[in-house]
Image: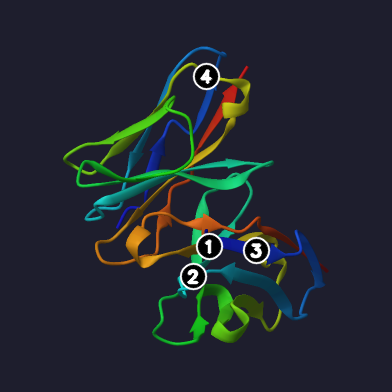
Amino acid sequence: AQSVTQLGSHVSVSEGALVLLRCNYSSSVPPYLFWYVQYPNQGLQLLLKYTSAATLVKGINGFEAEFKKSETSFHLTKPSAHMSDAAEYFCAASQGNQGGKLIFGQGTELSVKP
Amino acid sequence: KAGVTQTPRYLIKTRGQQVTLSCSPISGHRSVSWYQQTPGQGLQFLFEYFSETQRNKGNFPGRFSGRQFSNSRSEMNVSTLELGDSALYLCASRPGGMYEQYFGPGTRLTVT
């Protein structure tokens, strides 16, 4: 069965430092991959998506992610963290024949220190 | 374009009762999916509706059901509520032929 694993339930960085949130998927067929962000008491906001068009994907708020098939990874990065980036981040995957079903990772809470 | 809306935003129910949650997708989106979010289990898929038909179902008991209307609005129902049903219930919609889903703000259900 398809699964998504996020390494690290909590990541803490200083303001201005690199943000790296890790995501690995388990699937024999590369799925469609997504990163979402959730602020307290809110729903999920789509940051970026990979749908096989390009391996380096740019999203909103300066985030980007690189799809690496050989490593079954889709890590999220941002060159310089901002205080407003503090939130919970979820990696998710779906297969083409079950497009309406997202499989989520456990989530990574990002803290940004001043 | 207006986003996904969910009503009510907060709900308190007693064990044994039933509850109905509502979701209005983004205009033009015909697919609606529902998810349950809890601290222990994370985000779990409940079901997906497309053109009034359930297309996919997650691993939840039959107490959880849903439906979709001709205008794509969707409802989910939970009968015989249990304490463990306390969760944030999220609805998401997606445009035809695309895979990204757009989420609503959720309904926070508390079962006492």
Q: Position of residue B32 (x, y in %)?
A: 33, 48
**A110 or A67: nearer the viewer:** A67
Task: Tell me the element at label 2.
Answer: strand
In this rendering, the answer to whether A11 lies above or below B90 is below
Looking at the rendered structure, whether the residues under marks 4 and 2 are on a common chain is answered as: no
* Residue B56 visible in this rendered orientation of the protein: yes
Mark 1: few/some/many CA within 10 Å (<14, 14-19, 20+): many
Disc 4 sits on a residue from what chain? B
**Residue A2 in the figure: left or right of residue B98:** right
Residue under label 1, please give it: A92
Q: CA distance from mark 1 to mark 3?
A: 9 Å
- Hey, what amino acid is under mark 4? Leu
Residue under label 2, please give it: A33
- Could you tell me which quadrant the N terminus of chain B lies in? bottom left
User: Could you tell me which residue is drawn at 61 percent across and 59 percent down?
Assistant: A105
Residue under label 4, please give it: B81
Precedes in sequence: disc 3 or disc 2: 3
Disc 1 sits on a residue from what chain? A
The reply to whether the C-beta atoms of the residues labelled 1 and 2 are less than 8 Å apart is yes
Precedes in sequence: disc 1 or disc 2: 2
Precedes in sequence: disc 1 or disc 3: 3
Looking at the rendered structure, whether the residues under marks 3 and 2 are on a common chain is answered as: yes
Task: Tell me the element at label 4.
Answer: loop
- Hey, what amino acid is under mark 1? Ala
Q: Position of residue A27 (x, y in %)?
A: 52, 69
In this rendering, the answer to whether A52 lies above or below A33 is below
The reply to whether the C-beta atoms of the residues labelled 1 and 3 are less than 8 Å apart is no
Disc 2 sits on a residue from what chain? A
Per the rendering, the mark at residue B45 is none
Per the rendering, the mark at residue A5 is 3
Residue furthest toward the left?
Answer: B70
Q: CA distance from mark 1 to mark 2?
A: 6 Å
